[in-house]
Image (cartoon, helix red, strand yellow):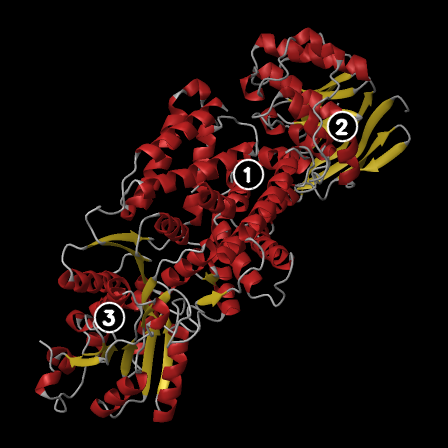
């Protein structure tokens, strides 16, 4: 039971960490995570070489391309980020369709233990995330979410910070998409549906549990664990999953209200509440 | 002059009309100078030009002399290395979610913050800060206006500029905090031998702290600005 | 940190105290029904499955439906839960559900039989090794449409067809291959095929309107997206007096002049027969061949046929559906 729950959590660790960078730290409406998740999976699954670490690197690259597109549309094209993300989603949905060639694409089975692969990938991702959060760039991402004008005042390139942050976030989403498809044996065009709500719910839960304004890797880890423990619990107790989406929305709403209840301990409000 | 920073032959046209015409300032090093004038006389514009704002003032002419170096006002990056402007809205300068200490550490980032370099929080604070009883580990948004202005000054100084420009640093502060800011400014000027040009409307507040010149901008009949 | 531990403990206690069994201890067999989303067609398939089993063996079976609500993450969680639960068989509706269940159970080395239904081209998905014998724990009913027969009927009842417009969702499994098959057939018949790709049912009207004037027939195949929004196509065809031919029998009630297809409940009932073979007779899934549903039925609707400019003198009384 614990292993299957852990298995599911490990599939989404890179995604939630990526969402933490863009949605939580930078506070940008990074809806392109959805197409990064899809495109990372599609690009990697359809890449000719499927040996060794190549597919994982290709998945990261696929997600990075999506992040680069949305961030460049915003920073160089001067398109508001929400619109840039929506346009990017449309664009990469079409590209994914072209690459797949059909609605569903089967992946060949992995030769090594899947759980082992997930553990290794998650540990590497978490270690990289941990050191990145403590680095100059990690702090810059958080500063951007706090005061985007800071960079102009101090002659720091805000273009570099935004593009760098979004590329990292989306590349992690792409990796997560590939892990999900590897685990399920196929990739199709609908795997990205519901990803943003999953990210927001997990981050809100993480924030509610780890009540801090500082950037910490504990927040996304706790959030993703809490999300899947809760989901698993609901399934086990016979909760009618027809209402799962509504339950998710109510959960996010309730958590946000609780977070803001005590004014003196209010965590900084932002447009997404994450 | 080697012990002065001189701004010379500043010309600026806006909408084809002369805005600044042959403006000249000479500021003795290690002193606090003031720039005064009526509202709309171009004080903030002059500060922006000196700071190296290339987005709005690409057609400016003039030279800034730092002892052995003469830098044209169009060499924006060179100017940005030597001159820092602390804006009127000093909160733009700060990341108020973070502490006083962390904000000072952010000055190490450079133009392209590295994903490999870890942030160091062991920043060396000036001794004068001890007098001001500031909790340096508290989030900046919980500090008073004066304390935040002091932080913005410290952050500006971290880059070791040759000239600091302050655009109405005490405009939104009460008299006690305003006095605290100027006391800190004087202490830091003495400690680091900095040159400072302040725009301030409150002559009564400014007068005891001014150790340099008082430059006045006046608007001529033709609309051009002139500095005395 | 204390809060995290506290919350985890609360969840842990709840896990072990809420031991709601997935089935009543009195039932002989427990079946999990995995459906990808909420859709009338899928509900009919499920209904067909349950009704046949209940009819044959009343009160001996319990059924639990797991609806993924279009969310693959949720589907995965549900499959994990099915794997842990005390289920004797899984009925997977659709390609995604079948594929994911097979993958997860194989990795966990679970031998729960899976009966799938409404899966187009299961061989292409590597669900089975061969249609005669899957060589694994799967069997089921594949989704097949005899386009040759369908288009032959069309050519008999409306000989002068120059342009055929196909409205479909290319993101659904199997439909791109269906489109290619239709393309080949109509090419031999000298008919021009125009394809309108839609991704959501609210796009149908906007995307189909530019092509309606120049087309003679609008064709809708087994496509959950377009079938959900077939009302829009009905209005369009009525207004422009163009023939609408659908592959869902329910579409005739919504206003299609011609339908050629199989009732969705048949997909469910055929799958139920296989499930009963496995559970009641002990036959292994690998020994049950993958089958197609019975041949399609053809119906037309007289009032719509006139409105959509179709002569009805060819039809026998048996073909008419009220």
Numbered disc 3: what chain? C
Q: Residues within 10 Å of mark 2 (few under 14, many from 20)?
A: some
Q: Residue at x 34, y 92 (%)?
A: C189
Q: Secondary structure at mark 3?
A: helix
Residue C26, given in percent of the width and then of the height, sits at: 19, 48
Same subunit, tags 2 and 3:
no
Residue B71 is marked as none
Query: Is B165 positioned to the left or the right of B143 in the image?
Result: right
Q: Secondary structure at mark 1?
A: loop
- In the displayed structure, A68 sits above or below C295; it is above
Quickly name the residue at label 1: A26
Residue A211, given in percent of the width and then of the height, sits at: 48, 26
Q: Nearer the viewer, mark 2 or mark 1?
A: 1
Q: Residues within 10 Å of mark 1 (few under 14, many from 20)?
A: many
Quickly name the residue at label 3: C270
Residue B72, given in percent of the width and then of the height, sits at: 81, 38
Same subunit, tags 2 and 1:
no
Same subunit, tags 1 and 3:
no
Numbered disc 1: what chain? A
- In the displayed structure, C207 sits above or below B130; it is below
Q: Nearer the viewer, mark 2 or mark 3?
A: 3
Q: Residue at x 14, y 82 (%)?
A: C306
Quickly name the residue at label 2: B159
Asked if disc 2 and disc 3 are in contact, CB closer than 8 Å, the reply is no
Q: Secondary structure at mark 2?
A: loop
Separation (CA) of disc 1 from disc 3: 54 Å
| Residue C253 vs residue C276, the one in the foreground | C276
| Residue B168 vs residue B152, the one in the foreground | B152
Q: Residues within 10 Å of mark 3 (few under 14, many from 20)?
A: many
Q: Nearer the viewer, mark 1 or mark 3?
A: 3
């Amino acid at each position: 039971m614990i292993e299957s729950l852990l298995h599911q959590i490990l599939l989404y660790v890179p995604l939630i960490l990526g969402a933490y960078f863009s949605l939580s730290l930078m506070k940008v409406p990074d809806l392109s995570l959805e197409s990064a998740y899809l495109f990372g999976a599609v690009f990697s699954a359809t890449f000719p070489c499927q040996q060794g670490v190549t597919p994982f690197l290709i998945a990261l690259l696929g997600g990075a391309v999506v992040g680069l597109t949305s961030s460049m549309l915003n920073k160089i094209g001067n398109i508001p980020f929400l619109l840039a993300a929506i346009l990017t989603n449309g664009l990469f949905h079409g590209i994914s369709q072209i690459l797949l060639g059909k609605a569903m694409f089967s992946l060949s089975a992995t030769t090594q233990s899947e759980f082992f692969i997930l553990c290794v990938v998650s540990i590497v991702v978490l270690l990289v995330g941990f050191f990145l959060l403590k680095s100059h760039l990690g702090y810059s991402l958080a500063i951007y979410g706090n005061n985007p004008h800071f960079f102009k005042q101090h002659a720091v390139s805000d273009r570099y910070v935004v593009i760098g942050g979004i590329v990292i976030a989306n590349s992690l989403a792409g990796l997560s998409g590939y892990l999900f498809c590897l685990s399920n044996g196929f990739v199709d065009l609908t795997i990205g549906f519901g990803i943003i709500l999953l990210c927001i719910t997990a981050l809100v839960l993480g924030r509610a549990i780890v009540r801090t304004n500082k950037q910490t890797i504990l927040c996304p880890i706790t959030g993703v664990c809490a999300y899947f423990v809760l989901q698993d619990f609901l399934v086990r107790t016979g909760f009618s999953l027809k209402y799962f989406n509504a339950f998710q929305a109510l959960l996010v709403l309730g958590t946000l209200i609780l977070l803001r209840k005590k004014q003196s301990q209010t965590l900084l409000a932002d447009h997404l509440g994450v | 002059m080697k012990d002065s920073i001189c701004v010379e032959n500043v010309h600026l046209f806006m909408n084809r009309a002369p805005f600044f015409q042959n403006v000249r300032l000479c500021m003795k090093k290690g002193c606090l100078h003031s720039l005064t004038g009526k509202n709309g006389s171009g004080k903030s514009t002059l500060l922006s030009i000196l700071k190296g704002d290339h987005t709005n003032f690409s057609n400016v002419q003039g030279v800034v002399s730092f002892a052995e170096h003469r830098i044209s006002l169009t060499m924006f990056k060179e100017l940005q290395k030597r001159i820092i402007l602390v804006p009127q809205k000093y909160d733009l300068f700060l990341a108020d979610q973070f502490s006083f200490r962390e904000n000072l550490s952010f000055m190490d980032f450079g133009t392209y913050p590295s994903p490999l370099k870890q942030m160091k929080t062991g920043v060396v604070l000036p001794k004068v800060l001890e007098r001001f009883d500031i909790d340096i580990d508290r989030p900046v948004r919980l500090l008073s206006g004066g304390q935040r202005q002091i932080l913005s000054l410290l952050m500006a100084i971290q880059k070791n500029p040759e000239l600091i420009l302050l655009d109405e640093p005490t405009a939104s502060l009460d008299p006690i905090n305003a006095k605290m800011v100027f006391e800190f400014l004087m202490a830091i000027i003495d400690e680091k031998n900095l040159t400072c040009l302040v725009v301030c409307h409150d002559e009564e507040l400014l007068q005891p702290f001014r150790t340099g010149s008082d430059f006045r901008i006046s608007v001529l009949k033709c609309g051009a600005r002139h500095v005395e | 940190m204390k809060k995290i531990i506290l919350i985890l403990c609360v969840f842990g206690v709840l896990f072990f105290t809420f031991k709601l069994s997935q089935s009543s201890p009195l039932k002989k067999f427990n079946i999990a029904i995995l459906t990808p989303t909420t859709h009338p067609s899928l509900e009919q398939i499920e209904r067909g499955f349950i009704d046949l089993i209940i009819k044959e063996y009343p009160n001996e079976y319990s059924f639990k439906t797991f609806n993924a609500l279009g969310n693959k993450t949720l589907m995965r969680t549900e499959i994990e839960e099915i794997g842990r639960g005390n289920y004797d068989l899984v009925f997977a509706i659709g390609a995604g559900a079948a594929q994911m269940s097979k993958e997860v159970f194989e990795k966990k080395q679970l031998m729960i039989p899976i009966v799938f239904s409404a899966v187009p081209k299961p061989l292409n998905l590597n669900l089975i090794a061969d249609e005669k014998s899957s060589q694994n724990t799967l069997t089921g009913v594949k989704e097949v449409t005899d386009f040759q027969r369908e288009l032959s009927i069309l050519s008999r009842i409306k000989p002068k067809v120059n342009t055929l417009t196909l409205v479909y969702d290319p993101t659904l499994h199997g439909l791109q291959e269906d489109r290619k098959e239709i393309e080949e057939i109509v090419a031999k018949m000298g008919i021009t095929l125009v394809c309108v790709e839609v991704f959501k049912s609210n796009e149908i009207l906007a995307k189909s309107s530019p092509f309606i004037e120049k087309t003679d027939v609008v064709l809708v195949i087994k496509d959950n997206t377009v079938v959900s929004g077939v009302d829009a196509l009905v209005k369009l065809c009525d207004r422009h007096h163009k023939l609408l031919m659908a592959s869902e029998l329910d579409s005739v009630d919504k206003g299609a002049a011609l339908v050629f297809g199989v009732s969705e409940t048949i997909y469910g009932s055929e799958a139920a027969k296989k499930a009963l073979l496995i559970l009641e007779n002990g036959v292994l899934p690998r020994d049950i061949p993958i089958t197609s549903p019975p041949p399609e039925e053809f119906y037309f609707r007289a009032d719509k046929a006139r409105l959509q400019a179709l002569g009805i003198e060819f039809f026998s009384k048996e073909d008419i559906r009220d």
